Every structure is written in structure tokens, then in C-alpha cells.
Amino acid sequence: MKLAPAPVLVFGWGNASRGDDALGPLFVERLRAALAADAGVECLDDYQLQPEHVLDLVGRRRVLFVDASIDAAAPFETMVLEAARDASFSSHAMTPRALLQAYRDVQHEEPPPCTLLAIRGERFELGQAPGEAALASLADALRWALAWLDESAVPGERYGAAGLTQAGV
Amino acid sequence: MTPTLETAARPAGLRRVAIDPLSRVEGHGKVTILLDAQNHVRQVRLHIVEFRGFEKFIEGRPYWEVPVMVQRLCGICPVSHHLAASKAMDRVVGATPVTPSADKIRRLMHYGQVMQSNALHFFHLAAPDLLFGFDSDLNRRNIVGVAAAHPEIAKKGVLLRKFGQEVIRATAGKRIHGTGSVPGGMNKHVSAEDRALLQRDVAQMKAWARDAVAIARALHAQNPALYDSLGRADANMLSLVRADGALDLYDGVIRARDAAGRILFDGASDQGYLDLIEEEVKPWSYMKFPFLKSRGREAGWYRVGPLARLQNCDFIPTELAEAARREFVASGGGAPIHAPLGYHWARMVEVLHCVEVIEQLLDDPDILSGELMAGGPRRRSGVGVIEAPRGTLIHHYEVGDDDLVTMCNLIVSTTHNNQAMNEAVRSVAREYLDGHELTEGLLNHIEVAIRAYDPCLSCATHALGQMPLDVTLQGPGGEVIDRVLREGPGRFVHRLT
């Protein structure tokens, strides 16, 4: 029997070996470690957004996308995402908006409510570690995310501060 | 095959058109076209800003880390790097050959990777151009446009790719950053549960792969004049083949044919690739230009990838794909197919072949049990060659007595195709740009020809806000006449400066 997906999906992307591009996967890794196993949050990461990630959105109550951004003001910016028929993706990556539009067209229904968390990054060279400024922004972003998880929790769900393991953030 | 239009006789005073970077192409590339006052094309160059730090990234690391670390070189085909590095390190640890179980599980992983990558390219990159036409509204030429107009095609594309990813997860351990393949073999079998899940869906995938071949064939039949000519450049062809001449994407000997289809060499060991291939440096490009030593710099450039593979092999060792390959080859009327749009049809034949191989391997008990590791006398160096989705991928390492990598040399598929892609751009520019006003549609013909090769120009950095397209038109005196930006959301904006 196939299990129902966790009601909340946190999806980060980036390359862990390219400086601040690691912010998305690092965010996911740290949030996963901080949340209780039964928190009702699935944490996924990948190199890039791809069309098949449409299927990861199915059955979710809400979704948080997390990526490094060279445009966002430090420490991070958030926005509610709307599906958009844009052409900005390269051969190998999609924008979150385009993914939502693909969801709408492929699944023939509206995607779940989605929020983008764009964490400020500045350096992206292969072999670089994330910079100190980026890691500070990451910590701020994690605190915001825990509050976001709590704020929009429905009765009976415990995601954020109340759902933390001893490890904390 | 002597390159023309590579260098203008008198570049001073020519107008310059820059396309930077190419939209929908990984990394950054730039096309420069020099036009004279009469809009005649005088010089065309595809500049690829290839990051050459890969080797330094690897050198100094313990050899056993390498198959995992190299996956971070490329976010698109990490499995190909994972397996090419593993094959090279098999040599270092003396595991030649690896055990039957390890060989079959790796093959399963690799064919899953090629299948999902080829499916992504066709359904979400090539199909929009092919279904809607190169001059159509930009907003329709993408997966979103396809999904709206052809929802069944888009859905199949998503699910075919998802299936390939599941094959990778079942064999590599995780859907990204897999650790399944190690120097000397594999560290896990496929679980019976995963096998059952994949077997449940494989028949459907095969049916969809056959549909995909039919779509590619039908698109070609609708406009054969275009498909046979856009970006055409006759080239030598290089790939691995099995010892008996069969298509083999995982292992084999190196074979090359000339543009007429005659075999140049065959049965060459992958360990001796440096005897076959040399890389030329040109002052105007960051990316090297490999050529076949036996043919020299001028005549030795070659093409790799699906279009080369299907014509370099003698047959495909699975029934449905071989029938499809015969039909594809026959479309050339007895001569090799050299037009880049042929890649799309060839890719779909490979998808069908991959699904057939996956189906066979899932029925093989060796993927569930049996020895996973082999070993033997240590060596100081090893070469691993694999047919990645975009073409031949070479990993070459030397390892010191302290187990640290002292030398790393990688030749990736896109580098092999560097000259071929330049020739494709020249062909398109010659046919579509000479004497015409520049439009987005015309410029997109150039992108279409390059995208047919599915180049991977750099690797997985992609932070939000990157990947604009910048087109600059300069007059004979160097002044900017016009500038066009394809901005992040895909808008195509003229900005006179």
C-alpha cells in the first residue's frame, strides 16, 4: 500500500561543491536533522528543479522551495509563488514558477500553495565552501522557516519549534 | 571538412552579433557572428566558457572518494561521471573485470541514466521547438507550452524521466549523490522490492518509448528538407562499440568512421585513447578541440553522441530498438545522416533500447545476489570510458602509493563535439542569416542546431537570477547598434543603448 505523502514538502536545490550554491541542500540537511521524524515534513533536495519534480508536489498541503539567490537581499527573501508560463529554464533546470505551471498542465489541477525562500549567495566556484555571510544567512533562513512551519500548521501538526529534536538548529 | 567561416580574412569593420549565453543550454556559451556592411556572414564562432577546474578539484583526493566526488561536476549526468570514474578506478584496484553482478547493476544504473536524460532532452527541450516550430512564440517553446498543447506527451515525458530516476535510486542508493558504484564493483544489490516496483512499470515505459520513436520519426517526415539540412556538417563519428560491433553504452572498444561511413579504426582499447585522440587549443576558445590523430587537425574532428553511436555500431542488440535503428539509418538513403536534428530521432531510439535493456536486467537474478567486489594487483593509473547521454566520456587518473590522485584528465562529451557544434552554427548562419535582418526566430535557428547536440557547457551552478540571454549588435566601428535581452522570466526585450 502506498503511503500518503507528508503534508508539507521542503525542497532545496543546488550543488554542494559550488560555494554558496550549497545553501539549498544545506538548508534541507539542517532542517531534516532538526525536525522530529514524525513532524509531517518531507525534506528533499536535488541539483536542479526538473519536470519530474511535479510528481513530488502531488498530495501536499503546502510547499517551501529553497535556493541560493544572487539577486535576493541578505539574509533572504520570501515570496508566494504563482504558476507562470515562462521560458526561463535552461535545458536542465526549471524555475519554481514554471514547475507550478507544469504541475497545472500535467496534473490538471491547481498546485498546492508554494513559497519560495531565496537565500542570499555570492560565490559559486567549484570546490569552494559556502562563505561566512551565506552561512549566517542560512541560519536566519532556518529560523524563519521554523516559524513558517508553525504559523501555518493545522491543529494536531507540530513542525517548528515545538517539533524540534534535541539537536535544534 | 576543412572549417570555413572560422576566421574572417579581414575582421576589422565587420558587425558583431553576440548571443550570450545561449538560452536553454547548461552553463554559458556565446555565439559571435561577424557580418559585413551587406549583412554577409564573414566569421562565426561558438565560444564555450568551459570551467577547467575539474581536474584540480579531483587531484589530491583519495581514489576511493573519486566516484562520489565527480558526481558534483555535473548536475545533469552525475551517474555518467560516477560510473566512468568507477571504471577507471577498477583498473587501479585490479578489478578487471568486475563481477557479473557488479557489471549488471552498473549497466542497469547507466541505462536508467541515459534513458531519463534522453527523455528530458526530447520531451522538454527539443519537442517544443519541433512541435511548435522554431519561429513560434517563445512562451510555447518549452515544457509548459508542450504540456498545455500536448498534455499526454508532457505527462509521458515526466513519467519516463521519473522511471529512469527510480532505476538510478534502486541501484545507486539515492536519487542524487549515489554511492552504489565503488572502485572494484558495487556496494549493494538491487532489492527485491525495488525490482518488483520497476518491473511493474517497465512494460508501460516500453510502450511510451515506442510512441516517442514514432513521434520523432513523424516530425522528421513532416519536413524532411529541414531535418536533413539545418546545421548539417559532415563529420567523422566516434563511439564505443561492443567487440562484435553492437551498440554498447557502458563498455567496449573504440571505433571511428569517416563522414562517408568507412571505418577508420576499430577494436581500439579505451586505455589507449591518447594514441587516438589529441586536443587542440585555439586562442579564441576556452574549450579544446579534440581530433583523431590519424586524420590530423584539419580533417580529424568528429561527432559523438546518439547520432554518431547509431551509425557507428553495426546493430543494436535488442529487437525493437534495432528495428527502429534500421528505419532511422534508412532515412539517410544509403548515406550517413549528418544533420544535427537527426539527434532527436536517434535519442528516442536509444530510449527504447535503454528500456529494453532495463527490462532484461530486471529479470536477471544476478542483480539481486552474487559477488559484488573484485580485486587484483594495484596499478598506478586507469582509464574509464563510457557512452554518456551526450556522447563519449573519458576519465583518466593516476594514483600515488599514498592512494591520492596525482593526475586527472577528463574529456567530456561536449568537448568532443566542440568543432561539430561550431560547424553546425556556421551552417545555420550561412543559410539563415546571410543577407537577412536579424530576428528572434532566426537567432533561434542557431540555438536549435546547438541544442540538438544537447551540450552541457558548465555544471550545476544555477542560482536564481542567472541565465539571461544577451544579444548585442555592433557596427563596423564597434558601436552598439542594438541589444536584445532574454531575461530570466523569458521575456525577449529590445534595448537600444
Image (cartoon, coloured by chain):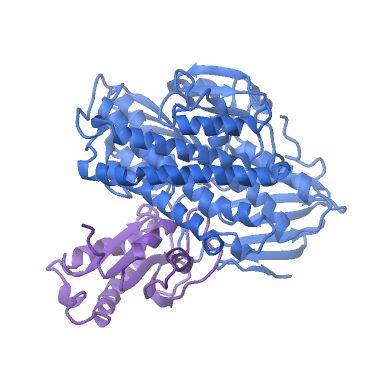
Chain colours: A purple, B blue
Q: Is residue B412 visible?
A: no
Where, by quadrant of the figure, is residue B139 drawn? bottom right
In this figure, what is the number of numbered marks?
Answer: 0
Q: Quadrant of the N terminus of chain B?
A: top right
Is B56 left, or right, of B46 in this rendering? left
Tell me, yes or no, if residue A89 can be seen here: yes
Which residue lies at the image location 46% right of the left edge and 52% below the top edge?
Answer: B157
Q: Position of residue B133 (x, y in %)?
A: 66, 55
Image coordinates for residue B33, horizontal then vertical, percent: 73, 50
Q: Residue at x 66, y 38 (%)?
A: B339
Closest to the observer, B280 or B160: B160
Q: Residue furthest right?
A: B38
- Which x, y percent locates residue B490? 58, 66
Task: Give the answer, above or below, for where B3 lies relative to A131.
Answer: above
Q: Position of residue B230 (x, y in %)?
A: 70, 43
The image quarter in which residue A54 lies: bottom left
Q: Is residue B49 above or below residue B148?
A: above
Residue A35 sits in quarter: bottom left
Instruction: Answer above or below: position of B157 versus A118.
Output: above
Q: Quadrant of the C terminus of chain B?
A: bottom right
Residue at x 55% of width, y 28% of height: B238
Kindly identify the residue that appears in the image at 59 percent across and 19 percent down.
B263
The residue positioned farthest toward the left in the image shown = A166
* Residue placed most toward the observer, B203 or B297: B203
